[in-house]
Amino acid sequence: MNCIFSRPVAVTAFRFTKEFEVIPRRIELDGVSYDLTNEYSILPMDGGSAVDVSDGTRWFRLLYSAKNTWQLLRIAP
């Protein structure tokens, strides 16, 4: 079951790919911190780029916008 959102999320730690793309390492949502694994997928989208990241249990789709903000778009098992 997918849960669809469009809300801000705090990225509290991140890393860079070899191409200098930003990948979240840890996010905070509703006061809960999620440590993310090294599994990710980058998706080009209008208005920014999205990344799918996993905490080992679920997948989070996050959109990075040109305004230097992160939006949570989806949580999937």
Image (cartoon, helix red, strand yellow):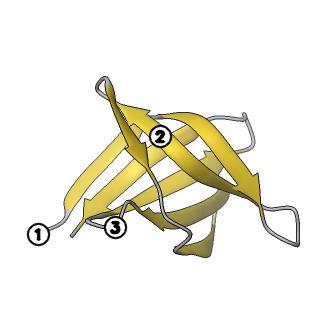
Q: Residue at x 75, y 43 (%)?
A: 66
Q: Is residue 8 visible?
A: no
Name the side, left or right, on which 31 lies relative to 22.
left
Q: Is residue 61 left or right of residue 41?
A: left
Look at discs 3 and 1 and give the one toward the viewer: 3
To which residue does mark 2 refer? 27
| Crowdedness near tag 2: few (<14), some (14–19) or many (≥20) residues, C-alpha within 10 Å | many
Q: Position of residue 28 (x, y in %)?
A: 42, 33
Residue extending farthest to the left is 1
Q: Which residue ends up furthest to the right in the rendered image? A: 19
Q: Helix, strand, or loop for circle 2? A: strand
Q: Label 2 amino acid?
A: Ile
The crowding category of the residue bearing disc 3, from other C-alpha atoms within 10 Å (few below 14, some 14 to 19, many at least 20), is few
Q: Amino acid at mark 3?
A: Gly
Query: What residue did someone put label 3 on?
Result: 56
The answer to whether residue 20 of the structure is visible from this angle is yes
Q: Counting residues from the N terminus, which is met first, the one under dot 2 or under dot 3? A: 2
Report which residue position mark 1 lands on.
1
Secondary-structure class at tag 1: loop
Image depth: mark 2 or mark 3 in front? 3
Q: Is residue 32 above or below residue 21?
A: above
Name the residue at 34% across, 67% down.
56
Q: Nearer the viewer, mark 2 or mark 1?
A: 2
Question: Which residue corresponds to the image point at 31% horizontal and 23% vertical from the top-left?
Answer: 31
Can you tell which mark lies on residue 45?
none
User: Few, some or many C-alpha atoms within 10 Å of disc 1 (few <14, some 14-19, many ≥20)?
Assistant: few
